[in-house]
């Protein structure tokens, strides 16, 4: 059995992060599935989905780390070709990846207490994002 | 229902990238599935699958970023043990990961317009690659 | 059909790595499934699952690379807020990701000979880890 839920949200730009766990948990309850996998994917190539301890310190650390390895103000070939300013966003998003897959069993996601499924915005301005949650199982 | 498609391609070495979206889309049409997940995986430990805006600028940016964080000419323990020259390839591939999972619904992948499923070659020379596309759903 | 196997193991701290391929292969044999996907996920936000050539050189290279990009002794906002010492662990784990999905077909995982599904410990001390292996298919 497959259940797909689309979730829209607005982000404030590079470094913004959104905890998707409540939406995911709610989708799982509604679907009534007991055992299977949850895939959470963001549509687009300048944001990512991962898991992390969703607290402001970790989110700030992640932003500073990203700024070190792929600086927003760097020289990117993507800028030269397209007049864009988000070369750093593309590099970061390709590295983190667009989706994460988490098993569930006994109607519960196999996440740790301090582990949340999180959308990380890498684009340089606010964006409207679409997240696809897909549950598959019995 | 599960459908597996194997796709072979040749790469030209480190930094080469191949857009797999056409093959994936075609496999989805052939399978006739409506809703589910597509897993795309590369066999081997020196290449990766991710999504990105498949245009030469982004691919060059990604290559330069990789060269900064895991330089091809660096000193790698893997070289000393095995006489290989691809320590940088192993580090990069472990970081990006070997597979990506993308939901589909209404017979379409939930990708953005500027988001392509891409094989990134990290090995130091040309390689023959096998990609496994697996579709699961209804 | 869905089969879930939980696997517990002890790690020795940051940089430790465990080859999960034997447990995964054994779970696949026991499940008797022919074609589908295997999702391997670690519970918690300071470890990761990826694939790599499981040999000491690659594991050392990966550790040195991680130490360069997210140094254990760095200044992390997570430390200031919580008195923790594992800010580097959180950054590394978010980047590598908590799970990997590998197809199987003809009762075999589509891994390369030198490609093992691996848990990488990023936390700063020994940890008891729970890995969830979930097989889905026919």
Image (cartoon, coloured by chain):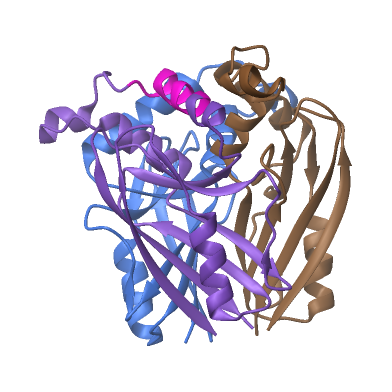
Chain colours: A purple, B blue, C brown
Q: Residue at x 52, y 30 (%)?
A: A56
Residue B131 seen in render: no
The answer to whether B42 appears left or right of C134 in the picture is left
**Quadrant of the image containing the N terminus of chain A:** bottom right
Dividing the picture into quarters, in which one does residue A121 lie? top left
**Quadrant of the image containing the C terminus of chain A:** bottom right
The answer to whether B114 appears left or right of C75 in the picture is left
Give above or below for C130 relative to C5: above
**Residue A19 image point, x, y percent:** 49, 48
Dividing the picture into quarters, in which one does residue C82 lie? top right
A73 or B72: nearer the eye?
A73
> How many circles with numbers are drawn on the protein?
0
Q: Residue at x 38, y 73 (%)?
A: B104
B84 or C9: nearer the eye?
C9
Give above or below for A128 relative to C26: above
Residue C51 seen in render: yes
Give above or below for C133 relative to C36: above
The answer to whether B4 appears left or right of B25 in the picture is right
The answer to whether C91 appears left or right of C19 in the picture is left
Give above or below for A77 relative to B42: above
- What is the span of residues highlighted in magenta in the rendered image? A61-71
């Amino acid at each position: 059995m497959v259940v797909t839920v689309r979730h829209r949200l607005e982000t404030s730009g590079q470094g913004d992060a959104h905890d998707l766990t409540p939406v995911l948990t709610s989708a799982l309850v509604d679907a009534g599935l007991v055992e299977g996998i949850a895939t959470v994917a963001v549509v687009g190539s300048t944001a990512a989905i991962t898991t992390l301890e969703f607290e402001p310190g970790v989110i700030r650390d992640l932003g500073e780390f990203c700024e070190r390895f792929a600086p927003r103000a760097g020289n990117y070939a993507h800028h030269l070709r397209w007049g864009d300013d988000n070369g750093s966003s593309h590099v970061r998003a390709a590295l983190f990846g667009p989706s994460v897959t988490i098993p569930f069993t006994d109607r519960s996601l196999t996440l740790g207490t301090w582990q949340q499924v999180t959308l990380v915005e890498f684009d340089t301005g606010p964006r409207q994002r679409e997240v696809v949650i897909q549950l598959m199982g019995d």
